Image (cartoon, grey):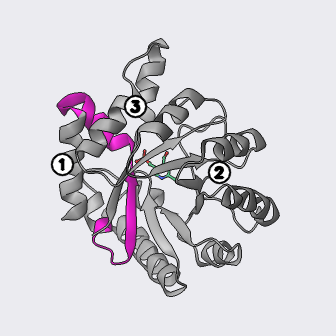
Amino acid sequence: MPKLGVNIDHIASVRELRKGIEPDPVLAAIICEAEGVDSIVVHLREDRRHIKEKDLYLLKKIVKTKLNLEMSIAPDIVEIACKVRPDQATLVPEKRKELTTEGGLDVLANFKKLKKVIEKLKNAGIIISLFIDPDKKQIDAAQKLGVKMIELHTGRYAEAKNEKEQDKYFKELKEAVYYAKKKGLTVNAGHGLNYYNVSRIARIEGIEELNIGYSIICRAVLVGLAQAVREMKRLVHG
Ligand code: PXP
């Protein structure tokens, strides 16, 4: 069964509604770790709409499991990452106007730029993962870049309009996991997973870690973060 990484961006989104000091992502990370999650995930966006640099520095100090920083390859973000040195950096595409990361990285189209950034991050001792669509061409390109880890975008599966469509995208994910594993890559997955659609994905053999944010934080608003994490852990770990 996969590990569970919890993305706590939206704890900071709630804080930013009033630009105040609570809820505090640091406290959220402590609660998640006390509940036995395997990693804490945050995305330092270029527009700083939720997580800020200060959060990142504090999280680096207190996270005991693994701090996974989702990031674009913008030079100033890369510079911050090299200073903070999270355990892992997950490179994602980023558009200013999107509500959330809309698709995977186009590794083929950004091959040279990615190569440079990966080199820098590797030199800073950071493990690299690439967030890509479940697509063989992207998996091949990721491998060519020399990364050892990818995260497959589960958005198409999560947003399927009906059962037939969901089955189609489930199959696509399963095949991509199998393909990437055969190439020796560590395979994570995430995006749009929730309490209703996660079990099927968690049962795909070969997925190392699922990264889940929005649905856990939404549930936490109603039942508390510790319980929301416990319930998700139960579904992920079976
Ligand atoms: N994995 C990656 C790479 C992401 O960019 C996100 C969204 O920040 C997630 C997982 C979590 O997605 P969600 O918030 O929809 O669970």
Q: Is residue 25 above or below residue 110?
A: above
Q: Is residue 89 above or below residue 9?
A: below
The image quadrant of residue 20 is top left
Can you identify the residue that label 2 sits on? Answer: 93
Q: Is residue 55 above or below residue 165?
A: above
Can you identify the residue that label 3 sits on? Answer: 26
- The image quadrant where one finds the N terminus is bottom left
* Disc nearer the start of the sequence (3/2): 3
In the displayed structure image, the side of residue 186 where residue 144 appears, left or right: right
Can you identify the residue that label 1 sits on? Answer: 231
> Crowding near pointer 3: few (<14 within 10 Å), some, many (20+)?
many
Determine whether the beta carbon of the residue marked 2 sits less than 8 angstroms from the nearest atom of ligand 1: no
Say what amino acid the circle numbered 2 marks.
Pro
Q: Which of these two is toward me, 61 or 202?
A: 61
Q: CA distance from mark 1 to mark 3?
A: 21 Å
Highlighted range, magenta = 201-224
Callout in the foreground (3, 2) = 3
- The image quadrant where one finds the C terminus is bottom left
Say what amino acid the circle numbered 1 marks.
Glu
Q: Is residue 127 above or below residue 8?
A: below
**SS of the residue under disc 3:** helix
Q: Position of residue 71 (x, y in %)?
A: 61, 47
> Crowding near pointer 2: few (<14 within 10 Å), some, many (20+)?
some
Q: Which mark is residue 210?
A: none
In the displayed structure image, the side of residue 54 where residue 232 appears, left or right: left
